[in-house]
Image (tube, rainbow, N blue to C red):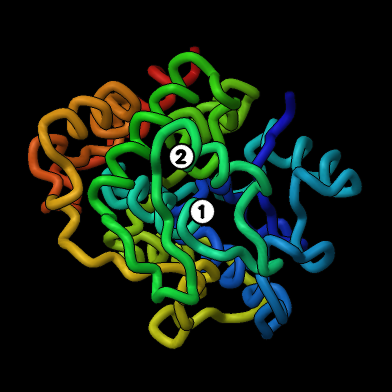
């Protein structure tokens, strides 16, 4: 199994377990900059050099050796499950991807046909009933996660605890879990704890939101998308994420964490 979704700087100053839709573009660019003094020209997910990634065969032995012996500081980053699933919907389902096409080819037509989801299109200014379509998308999300149909769950909407756990189960240990909502504070702690070849001034780092501008803007506040049934579905899918990463299930309008993350609890509960 190894360490899927794990990135490491070439200097081995730090190890990061990617969780999709949780500031991963910005974190990857910070890691790249901390070694090279410049940002990667393009989407950091496309970088084949300048950053070790588990997806690159040449990087695997280095990442494996580092993580198994905990040579470097290791961290990950999480986000409120309500805002994360909304972001996945607007980016991956409604948005046009970097290659100019819809995400995963026939996925959107399948959703339109089987779940009655509308996604709008750029020509019409993405006009559609966002709330109705999002709630239908939640049913699809639940079906993929609970019954693995009509397809396997996608990394962008599978539970964060699942991503975080593979690192632990295979022999890694986290030193820090950063909240996206308190990004500068958490990422500042990471940078304070490590030695990087190039100094990173966090307040001067831009946000790299690669999904922005490719789809419709969210037309309503977060809580408007979640009625009782939607909240029930979200709890069914993401109950561990709320519990372990200390987010407020009862109030979708409150994106901020409501407690402190207990790393020992996370290693114990996700290490099985």
How many other residues sit within 10 Å of disc 1, few (<14), some (14-19) or many (≥20)?
Answer: many
Q: Residue at x 32, y 29 (%)?
A: 238
Mark 1 = which residue? 92
Query: Which element type, helix, strand or loop, lies under badge 2?
Result: loop
Whole-angstrom CA distance, mark 2 to mark 1, is 10 Å
* Foreground pick, 251 / 75: 251
- Number of residues whose C-alpha sits closer than 10 Å to that of mark 2, classed few (under 14), some (14–19) or many (20 or more): many
- Location of residue 198 (image quadrant): bottom right
Q: Are the residues tagged 2 and 1 within 8 Å (C-beta)? A: yes
Rendered image: mark on residue 157: 2
Looking at the image, residue 58 lies above or below residue 37: above
Instruction: Give percent across and percent down for residue 42.
Output: 69, 77
Q: Earlier in the sequence, mark 2 or mark 1?
A: 1
Q: Is residue 174 in view?
A: no
Residue drawn at x 84%, y 48% is 56
Point out which mark residue 251 bears. Answer: none
Q: Quadrant of residue 154?
A: top right
């Amino acid at each position: 199994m190894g360490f899927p979704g794990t990135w490491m700087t070439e200097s081995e100053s730090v190890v990061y377990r990617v969780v999709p839709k949780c500031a991963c573009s910005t974190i990857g660019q910070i890691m790249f900059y901390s070694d090279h003094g410049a940002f990667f020209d393009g989407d950091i997910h496309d970088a084949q050099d300048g950053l070790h990634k588990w997806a690159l065969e040449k990087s695997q032995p280095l990442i494996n050796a580092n993580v198994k012996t905990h040579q470097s500081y290791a961290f990950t980053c999480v986000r409120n499950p309500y805002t994360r699933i909304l972001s996945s919907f607007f980016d991956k389902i409604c948005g046009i991807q970097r290659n100019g096409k819809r995400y995963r080819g026939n996925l959107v037509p399948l959703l339109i046909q089987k779940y009655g989801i509308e996604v709008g299109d750029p020509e019409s200014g993405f006009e559609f009933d966002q709330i109705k379509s999002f709630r239908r998308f939640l049913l699809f999300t639940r079906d993929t996660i609970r019954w693995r149909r009509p397809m396997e769950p996608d990394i962008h909407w599978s539970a964060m605890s699942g991503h975080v756990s593979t690192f632990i189960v295979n022999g890694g240990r986290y030193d820090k879990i950063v909240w996206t909502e308190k990004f500068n504070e958490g990422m500042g702690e990471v940078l304070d704890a490590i030695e990087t070849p190039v100094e990173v001034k966090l307040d001067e780092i831009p946000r790299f939101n690669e999904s922005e501008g490719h789809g419709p803007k969210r037309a309503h506040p977060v809580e408007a998308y979640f009625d009782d049934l939607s909240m029930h579905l979200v709890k069914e899918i993401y109950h561990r994420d709320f519990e372990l990463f200390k987010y407020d299930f009862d109030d979708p309008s409150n994106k901020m964490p409501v407690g402190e993350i207990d790393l020992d609890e996370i290693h114990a509960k996700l290490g099985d």
